[in-house]
Image: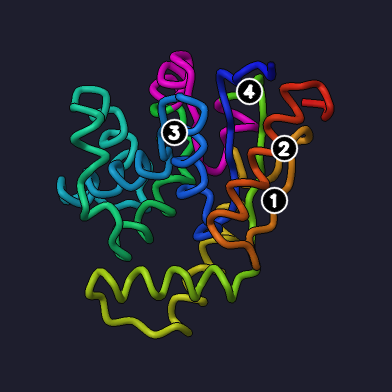
Amino acid sequence: MTETPKIIAIDGTFASGKGTLAKRLAAHYGLAYMDTGKLYRATAKATLDAGGDPDIEKDASKAAKSLGKRNLDEMLSDPTLKSGPIGAAASKVAVHPAVRAALLDLQRDFADQGAVLDGRDIGTVICPDADVKLYVDAKPEIRAERRHKELLGYGEEISFETVLAQLQERDARDMGRKDAPLKPAEDAHYLDSSHLSIDEAFKGACRIIDAVMAGKFDA
């Protein structure tokens, strides 16, 4: 019988489907789940709610430090975190080293219980010793199309071209920041979701995870 992983780290680009995949994997393997991107969205919202500027590290780090005093489930379930403006602000606060440092222990403590975490630096920084690491990506145009449909579903009026431009800007910011840039961990397994359905991506990820745990892949 294949051993169940304790920690699965899932990194990848924005709108690549890693969040949906991570939720299904957590349910499948009986693990807790954290969308770490929501921590940065919550930080962004807290920064804005306090009248701060997401581009100013002092404002953003103060907001990040305040998250530990709040109810995590309630905070991360706030539907406003999914909005376009909060997402854009989240990408700005995430570049600050002080913000990432403030959220580091919170994420590691959560992972210690046994969990699937998805984000930008899970396999490289947060959980470098995770049992299995995945890096999920898709073509920019496909990711932009997914995000555009999502935003329209929230009632936001925005063009596909604007969403694509914002996505490319976000990719550049995520990959170009000095502190914990978005990149695959050296031992991560790549999953291209461009032309995969949710079920196909899930089955592909399970095959990778089970093979790693069975010793058929180098973890």
Tell me the SS state at disc 2: helix
- Amino acid type, mark 3: Ala
Q: Is residue 120 left or right of residue 32?
A: right
Q: What color scheme is it? A: rainbow
Mark 3 or mark 4, earlier in chain? 3
Q: Report the amino acid beneath label 2.
A: Ile
At a point 47% along the width and 70% down the height, the residue shown is: 146
**Placement of the C terminus among the 4 image quadrants:** top right
Asked if 17 appears above or below 104 in the picture, the reply is below
Q: Residue at x 41, y 40 (%)?
A: 35
Q: Label 3 vs label 4: CA separation?
A: 18 Å
Which label's residue is closer to the chain start, 2 or 3? 3
Dot 3 corresponds to which residue? 27
Nearer to us of marks 3 and 1 is: 3
Q: Nearer the viewer, residue 86 or 202?
A: 202
Instruction: Specify start and end residues of the magenta stretch as a single range.
Output: 104-126
76 lies left or right of 210: left
| Viewer-nearest residue: 84 or 1 | 1
**Alpha carbon separation for disc pair 1 and 4:** 17 Å
Quarter of the image for residue 87 reads: bottom left
Identify the element where label 4 is drawn. Answer: loop
Q: Is residue 1 magenta?
A: no
Between the residue at mark 2 and the residue at mark 4, the CA separation in whole angstroms equals 14 Å
